[in-house]
Image: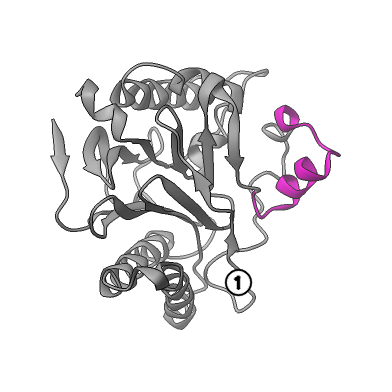
């Protein structure tokens, strides 16, 4: 069933292993978040779909750092605070960017004030008509693929491994097996936190936007992700993405990526996708 959102849909540290589909910002969005296989503690991933008028909204995911205390609380704080500032400024679209940045900065302050040393990544995308702009902190990532599965945009993880791949000293495939892949150099929860803002990008009818935590990108190669989402209904692509990632997490391989982790992702396509539902 496709739902229409009248207010923000926030999944904060809960287990939603069944895919949900929404009419959102002039298109279709599919969202899912769940704990790592066999994990008994909290899901430390959070996500939000924040509508803000006709054909406008914000998608956001956050990944609380499992090696630090209160990861669930940190990721939930980030998503909740971004939602609050975006909703508060919905009538002021010229300052849409300001709302997202304010939300991230306020979340950073709140997480630091919590005083337990927690932290979280965040990746957010503003959508207005057929234009999008990405924002991220850490290694939660944003990927936009176009026709013939061309990559129109891919964020660079704020990590030593991410920078090494970008500099060309480490192959992307090898990065998935690197022992230091889990290290992140920029997070919400530190005084030095910085937000990377991407370019304004036009979405064409067959483009697909993915906003996801590293539970997705640490278990599937980019080419695998592109092949899964390249055709068919968005809901089917999202379900296939989840199943492929889950299989990779539960079946150890010496040659394929394998990193059991919490998983959170949102897929989005522009208006043309509505005809499939």
Res 7 visible: yes
Residue 4, position as x, y percentages in the image: 15, 44
Which residue corresponds to the image point at 27% horizontal and 49% vertical from the top-left?
Answer: 14
Tell me the residue at 49%/39% (across/down).
Answer: 215
- Name the secondary structure under disc 1: loop
Magenta part of the chain:
157-174
Give the percent coordinates (x, y) of residue 199.
Answer: 59, 53
Q: Quadrant of the C terminus?
A: top left
Left or right of 116 on screen, residue 184: right
Give the residue drawn at x 47%, y 65%.
69
Query: Main structural element of the magenta stretch: helix, strand or loop?
Result: helix
Where residue 231 sits, quadrant-wise, is: top left
Locate the N terminus and report the quarter of the image it occupies. top left
Residue 178 to residue 66: above or below: above
Query: Residue 28 in the image: x percent, y percent?
Result: 28, 36
Q: Residue at x 40, y 70 (%)?
A: 94
256 or 221, which is in the foreground?
A: 221
Whether 167 is among the magenta residues is yes
Q: Which residue is mark 1?
A: 193
Q: Is residue 177 left or right of residue 130?
A: right
Check the image and report above or below for 273 versus 195. above
């Amino acid at each position: 069933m496709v739902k229409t959102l009248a207010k923000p849909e926030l999944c904060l540290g809960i287990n939603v292993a069944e895919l949900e589909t929404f009419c959102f910002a002039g298109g279709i969005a599919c969202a899912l978040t769940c704990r790592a296989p066999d994990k008994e503690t909290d899901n430390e991933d959070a996500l939000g779909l924040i509508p803000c008028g006709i054909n406008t909204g914000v998608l956001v995911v956050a990944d609380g750092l499992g090696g630090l205390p209160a990861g669930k609380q940190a990721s939930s704080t980030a998503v909740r605070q971004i939602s609050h500032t975006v909703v508060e400024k919905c009538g002021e679209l010229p300052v849409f960017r300001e709302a997202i940045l304010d939300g991230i900065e306020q979340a950073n302050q709140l997480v630091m004030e919590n005083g337990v040393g927690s932290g979280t990544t965040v990746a957010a995308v503003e959508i207005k008509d057929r234009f999008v702009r990405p924002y991220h902190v850490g290694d939660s990532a944003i990927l936009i693929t176009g026709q013939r599965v061309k990559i129109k945009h891919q964020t660079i993880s704020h990590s030593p491994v991410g920078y090494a791949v970008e500099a060309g000293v480490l192959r992307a495939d090898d990065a998935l097996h690197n022992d230091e892949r889990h290290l992140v150099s920029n997070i919400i929860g530190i005084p030095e936190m910085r937000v990377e803002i991407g370019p304004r990008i036009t979405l064409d009818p067959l483009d697909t936007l993915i906003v996801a935590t590293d539970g997705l990108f640490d278990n599937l190669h980019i080419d695998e992700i592109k092949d899964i989402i390249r055709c068919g209904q968005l809901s089917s692509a999202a379900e296939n993405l989840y199943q492929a990632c889950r299989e990779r997490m539960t079946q150890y391989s010496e040659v394929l990526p394998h990193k059991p982790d919490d998983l959170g992702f949102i897929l989005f396509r522009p208006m043309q996708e509505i005809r499939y539902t």
